[in-house]
Image (spheres, rainbow, N blue to C red):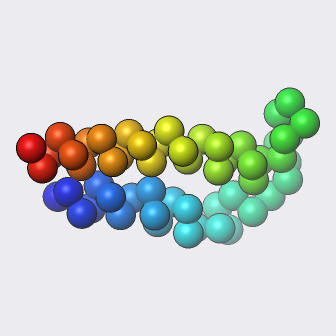
Amino acid sequence: MKYILLLVPCVLALLTPLYNSIDPVLFGLPFFYLYLLALVPISSLFVYLAWKVER
């Protein structure tokens, strides 16, 4: 279970067709950068959950 939780952020980062677009733009940042910035806290959440499952 722990490894599946750690695999989710990796798969989300590798699905480039999912976020390979410029539109929509928020605060002058294209969607590509917004997606990657949102992936940072999402990844840390999944790492935390994997740590809690391991304990």
Q: Residue at x 20, y 57 (%)?
A: 2
Residue 52 sits in quarter:
top left
- The single residue placed furthest to the left in the displayed view is 55
Tag count in the figure? 0
- Please identify the quarter of the rendering in which residue 29 is found: top right
Question: Where is residue 48 drawn, in percent x and y?
Answer: 30, 41
Compared across the picture, whether 6 is left or right of 21 comes to left
Does 3 appear above or below 30?
Answer: below
Using the image, determine if residue 27 lies above or below residue 4: above
Q: Residue furthest top?
A: 27
**Which residue is at a point 38% across and 39% down the rendered structure image?**
45
User: In which quadrant is the N terminus drawn?
Assistant: bottom left
Q: Residue at x 9, y 44 (%)?
A: 55
Examine the rendered structure and indicate whether residue 39 appears above or below residue 10: above
Q: Is residue 30 above or below residue 1?
A: above
Closest to the observer, 2 or 15: 2
Q: Tell me what residue is drawn at x 32 percent, y 58 percent.
A: 6
Q: Looking at the picture, how far across and down is residue 5, in whole percent?
A: 29, 55
